[in-house]
Amino acid sequence: PSCIALIAAAGSGQRFGAERPKQYLDVAGKPVLRHTVEAFLRHPQVSAVRVVINPAFRDLYETAVAGLGLAEPVAGGASRQDSVRNGLDALAESAPDLVLIHDAARPLIDDTTISAVIAALGQQPAAIAAVPVADTLKRGRDGVVADTVDRSGLWRAQTPQGFRFPDILAAHRAAAGLELTDDAAVAERAGLSVALVPAKEENFKVTTPDDLTRAARILDAGLS
Ligand code: C5P
């Protein structure tokens, strides 16, 4: 089946607090976004990579992906959900069988996880990289523990999140305007069954400056 990777890179990175969005910061010698894009480009089952960006940062984008031969980037929106929907709309012309939606801010995605998500799409219409919750979960209220949440059966959702393209395009169009934080939630709302694919801690989302240091350490050590 044809499979396109859609990279959500249109965030402004306000939480991170750097002078430019985090996906354009360098880690281990190249921008975070370039690490992410290259991980999908080198995967033999991924036929193309398309990136959703904020056009205000077009110059940073061009520098980050120089020489990779990517198609024209898609303009994102105010929320991640809007950005992904714009990306899916742009892919409608090429109508791939499968799409893998991935956060630009997860540069340590590995081949094995990408393969496992694609493989799971043979059985289910949707599949997401995820990690089982290992810590005990507390609900806080005013700085003290209100109660302990049963962690059994709980997973932390990562990306890539893979879908059969027509399903997720229709689901995203139907969910426009809602505030859903991942694409699996969009799929769930459309009644699609979503497979959980065990992934790795290393595929964390770069959110804080400490995360960038952690990513650099892993990349510099050649652990990924
Ligand atoms: O903000 P957060 O880290 O949760 O964003 C996850 C991913 O979604 C990032 O790679 C970010 O660039 C992207 N995003 C987007 N459009 C937005 C907001 C976030 O593509 N409006």
Image: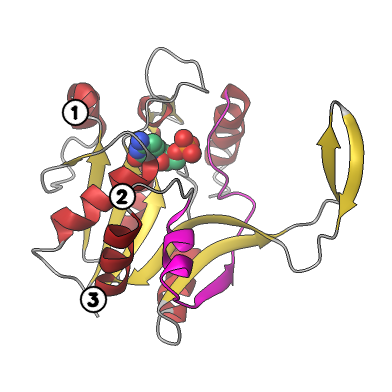
Q: Residues within 10 Å of mark 3 (few under 14, many from 20)?
A: some
Residue 97: mark: 3
- Left or right of 131? Residue 45 is left
The first of marks 2 and 3 along the sequence is: 2
Q: Indicate the amino acid at tag 3.
A: Asp
Q: Residue at x 13, y 47 (%)?
A: 69
How far, Cα to Cα, is label 2 from label 3?
17 Å
The verdict on label 3 being within 8 Å of ligand 1 is no
The first of marks 2 and 1 along the sequence is: 1
Q: Position of residue 113 (x, y in %)?
A: 50, 65
Q: Residue under circle 1?
A: 55
Q: Residues within 10 Å of mark 2 (few under 14, many from 20)?
A: many
Front residue (pair 220, 82): 82
Q: Indicate the amino acid at tag 2.
A: Val
**Could you tell me which secondary element the residue under label 3 belongs to?**
loop
Q: Is residue 193 magenta?
A: yes
Residue 84: mark: 2
Q: Are circles 2 and 1 on residues that touch, CB within 8 Å?
A: no
Q: Is residue 114 above or below residue 31?
A: below
Q: Can see residue 134? A: yes
Q: Is residue 220 above or below residue 198?
A: above
Q: Is residue 127 above or below residue 66?
A: below
Q: Residues within 10 Å of mark 1 (few under 14, many from 20)?
A: some
How far, Cα to Cα, is label 1 from label 3?
28 Å
Q: Are circles 2 and 3 on residues that touch, CB within 8 Å?
A: no
- Residue range corresponding to the magenta coloring: 182-208
Q: Can see residue 112? A: no
**Could you tell me which secondary element the residue under label 1 belongs to?**
helix
Q: Residue at x 45, y 75 (%)?
A: 191
Q: Indicate the amino acid at tag 1.
A: Pro
Residue 215, image quadrant: top right
Q: Position of residue 90 (x, y in %)?
A: 14, 54
